[in-house]
Image (tube, rainbow, N blue to C red):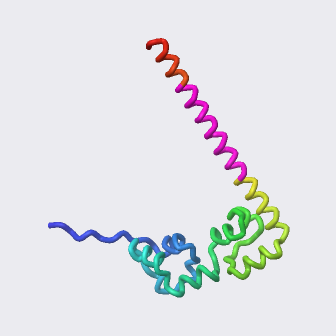
Amino acid sequence: MMSEKKPQTMKSATAAQKLGILLQAAPEEFQNSMVSRAELAELTENPPQWLADLRANGPHPRQVVAAKLGVSTSGLARAGVTEPLTTAEIKQLLQQPPAWLVTERATQAEVRAQQVRDKDAKAEKAAKRERAERGAAQRAAHRGE
């Protein structure tokens, strides 16, 4: 006797995070429901009007606000930005950036540049190691080992 497989579901907060929306701004029926993977895929592929409007206009969750401003979520916290922002508010900040935004964008750019340098250094180290191993194997082969 096989039981029917139950679809995997997630809390609405998790679904909202995956959709990049603020849960509190979503319709009440979405907020109070469990969302299956199939429903999430459908929302992603064919967003209803409420979802399209939220994504376009906000209010946006912290991660989305940070990404649109080009800063980290920590940068938002340091600046005292604790409330969700709308797309219009984000555009206004980008058009007339306050000092904190200029500073945090520079910090974020330096963090990203350092990550690139670290990645390049790691790749170079791996390439050197590979060349050394290949050379050792060739020397061993020439010696008849």
Residue 82's quadrant in the figure? Answer: bottom right
- The residue lying at 68 percent from left, 68 percent from top is 66
Q: Does 29 appear in magenta?
A: no
Residue 37 rendering spot, x and y as whole percentages: 40, 71
Can you say which quadrant of the picture contains the N terminus?
A: bottom left
- Compared with 115, 2 (above or below) is below
| Region rendered in magenta | 113-134
Which of the pair 94/66 is nearer the observer? 94
Residue at 71% x, 65% y is 70
Residue 94 vs 25, above or below: the answer is above
Q: At x 66% / y 40%, what residue is drawn?
A: 121
Near-viewer residue (144 or 39): 144
Residue name at image x 81 percent, y 65 percent: 102
Query: Does the segment drawn in magenta span residue 127?
Result: yes
> Which residue occupies the extreme top position in the image?
143
Residue sitting at the far left? 1
Q: Give residue 22's quadrant in the image.
A: bottom right
Image quarter of the C terminus? top left
Would residue 140 be found to the left or right of residue 88 on screen? left
**Quadrant of the image occupied by residue 10:** bottom left
Q: How many marks?
A: 0
> Which residue extends farthest front?
142
Percent across and percent down for residue 14 are 50, 70
User: Seen in the image, is 71 located left or right of residue 3?
Assistant: right
Q: Name the magenta segment's main secondary structure.
A: helix
Q: Position of residue 64 (x, y in %)?
A: 63, 71
Percent across and percent down for residue 79 are 77, 67
